[in-house]
Amino acid sequence: MDHLLIRDIEAALAWSGPSSTPSRFQRGSLPDPGICSRLLTPTRFLDLIMRRSLVSPQVRCFQDGSELHPSSLLQMNTTRRGQVIPMVDMRRLTQHLQSGCTLILDAANHFDPTLEVACRAFQWWSHAPVQVNVYLTTGDASGFSLHWDDHDVLAVQLAGDKDWEVRGPSRRAPMYRDAAPNLDPPEDVVWSGTVKTGDVLHIPRGHWHRANRTGRVSGFSLHATFGFAKRTGVDWLGWLADQSRREGIFRDDLKRWGDPEELQTEGKALIDAASCLITSHPPTHYLAAVAHATSTGRFVSTAGVFGSPSAVVCVTDFPPRIETQGDTATVTTAEKRIVFAGKALPALELLLSGNPVRLDYVSTTAGIDGERLGEVLVREGICAELTPELFSGYIGLTTDDKL
């Protein structure tokens, strides 16, 4: 998938792909800050908040360094049939914005097609799950106090300005669920300064940081943080535990009482079986398995009620794998394995590129019935028909020479 945000971030941070991302803090500026308003603007963010049913903690508001009670932000709207729908009270929110606050929306990619497409592009690029949270700050408000995240973060300043302080880690590769607490930040500051529209910060997992607009009586800041949940050895071991359920020896009850020799024999058998399991399921197998075992993204399917789709786009969480053997081409993704005739390969490469593509373009370019092939991929949940609403997430951010 070709996405301009990834291209510009690589240029801003001097990266040459996901393998070149360092485990140290970095900052830079996008070559074209104009891309920020295409991603999200403050008013579009508020409109997005207004039109959806949201609850705490997905939407939160901070004032004077403390989180406001949900009742000061949310209201329960009751329909005439008695259905209760929680929504943001826009009148109260306006008052908070006027006096200075930080409004946070977690997982904004679930509500906005542009951010959804950006997260999918980052997932295809990094092969790690990605979520984006959005922060709108007005006046001199601050958000979270000094803290660390259990995932890598790319913070993109979309509008306005904000002061940041970044420190190093105080524990190697800390985790949300860990063997020891990680409570004391280091004293040394790695970087502090003001970020402006188009600036980018790369904050690796475990680096302590905070952001605020202290001392500013006016103005605002809008930034998005893309969180990359990379796989760890702990994840691999958890996956191995799931694989062990296939073998009876691991499902059997452990003996608590009995002859010491019998207990020792059982223990040795389990250790040998576990060793065999580890050897036959190395980390590379785990990474390959999870890349093709996730579900496809949500998408609208009209089932042809309004006519056949004219364009489609691949909506899998990670790039589908296409393998050729003899006169066949096999597509593997999202726990599905579909075999096509080998002559479909050029068309499959177009349809599974991650970029929107017209079906008549596929037919003309690949010399195959693009509409029929697209119908199969849509039916299997690998591609989605390109509705105008979904297409809005791609306009101006991906190459569209095939549309």
Image: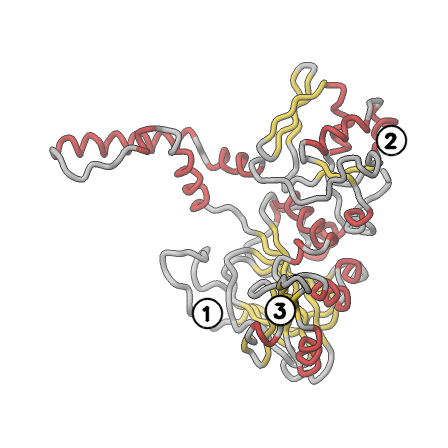
Marks 1 and 3 close (CB-CB < 8 Å): no
State how far apart marks 1 and 3 are (Cα): 40 Å
Q: In the structure shown, which secondary structural element does the residue marked by tag 3 occupy?
A: strand
Disc 3 target residue: 76
Q: Which residue is mark 2?
A: 360
SS at badge 1? loop
Q: Residue at x 61, y 51 (%)?
A: 130
Q: Position of residue 215 (x, y in %)?
A: 65, 84
Among numbered discs 2 and 3, the one appearing first in the sequence: 3
Q: What amino acid is found at the position of numbered circle 2 in the picture?
A: Asp
Q: Residue at x 65, y 43 (%)?
A: 297
Residue type for callout 1: Pro
Q: Please state, as top left, top right, bottom left or bottom right, where the N terminus lies in the image.
A: top right
In the displayed structure, 113 sits above or below 290; it is: below
- Describe residue 186's horizontal placement relative to residue 144 as left or right: left
Check disc 1 and report the residue beneath it: 185
Instruction: Please tell me which residue lies in front, 64 or 208.
Output: 64
| Residue 279 locus on image (x, y percent) | 39, 30
Amino acid, disc 3:
Met
